Image (cartoon, helix red, strand yellow):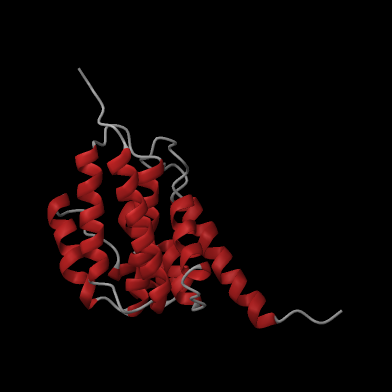
């Protein structure tokens, strides 16, 4: 039996510590979808897409993917992240963090405007995040979301992703396929009659 690669184990330990941290921070949160799945599933799926579809092996990107919503959606501080996971991971998390003080429409417009100026690492996370969100909206939409609201989200996500292109062809193609599938499903769904 050969000795384990200690560098690989150390890296796995850092990533698992980030997952544990994010799980603790998001522990009382649920996704908006019809299944109300535990929120932690979202950042784990984002990181998984980056690693398994995008073939990204950069540990800081994977850690930042797992942590990408902690500052925005929990009481996590930048100081906590830098102390536990380092400056590089924090900087990427901050790049993809919306300022919740701003109105929603302003935040959405800023994502479109800022996307072309993000680092490669942040663009990769944005791509994977939008893929997961589109798949969730398509398969387990939040209750009360009309076809128009879903279409608006799909169009907005495509605009954000357009500013992130050129960094990972695999993720970009995966996004395009997810968007095409979601639009097909939306077009084939009969309108609901609420009368």
Comparing 7 with 194, the one in front is 194
Work out which residue is located at the far right of the displayed protein and give it.
1
Comparing 8 with 78, the one in front is 8
Work out which residue is located at the far top of the displayed protein and give it.
195
* Above or below 67: residue 25: above
Name the side, left or right, on which 3 lies relative to 29: right
Q: Quadrant of residue 167?
A: bottom left
* Above or below 104: residue 119: below
Work out which residue is located at the far front of the displayed protein and give it.
188
Task: Say whether residue 76 is visible.
Answer: no
Indicate the position of residue 3 as horizontal and vertical percent values.
Answer: 80, 81
Comparing 185 with 19, the one in front is 185
Comparing 192 with 61, the one in front is 192
Name the side, left or right, on which 47 lies relative to 193: right
Quarter of the image with the N terminus is bottom right
Q: Quadrant of residue 87?
A: bottom left
- Give the number of callouts: 0
Indicate the position of residue 120 as horizontal and vertical percent values.
Answer: 34, 79
Task: Say whether residue 37 is visible.
Answer: yes
Indicate the position of residue 2 as horizontal and vertical percent values.
Answer: 83, 82
Quarter of the image with the C terminus is top left
Residue at image position (22%, 47%) is 151
Residue at image position (58%, 64%) is 16
Indicate the position of residue 114 as horizontal and vertical percent values.
Answer: 19, 70
* Above or below 57: residue 38: above
């Amino acid at each position: 039996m050969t000795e384990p690669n200690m560098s690989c184990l150390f890296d796995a330990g850092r990533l698992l510590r980030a997952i544990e941290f994010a799980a603790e921070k998001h522990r009382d949160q649920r996704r908006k979808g019809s299944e109300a799945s535990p929120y932690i599933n979202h950042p784990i799926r984002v990181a998984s897409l980056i690693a398994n579809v995008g073939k990204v092996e950069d540990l800081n990107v994977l850690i930042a993917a797992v942590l990408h919503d902690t500052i925005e959606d929990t009481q996590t501080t930048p100081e906590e992240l830098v102390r536990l996971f380092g400056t590089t991971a924090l900087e990427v998390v901050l790049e993809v963090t919306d300022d919740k003080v701003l109105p929603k429409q302003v935040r959405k417009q800023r994502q479109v405007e800022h996307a072309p100026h993000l680092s490669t690492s942040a663009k990769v996370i944005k791509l994977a995040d939008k893929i997961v969100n589109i798949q969730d909206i398509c398969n387990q939409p939040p209750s009360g979301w009309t076809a128009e609201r879903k279409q608006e989200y799909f169009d907005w996500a495509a605009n954000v992703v357009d500013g992130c292109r050129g960094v990972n062809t695999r993720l970009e193609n995966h996004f395009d396929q997810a968007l095409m599938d979601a639009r097909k499903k939306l077009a084939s769904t009969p309108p609901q009659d609420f009368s």
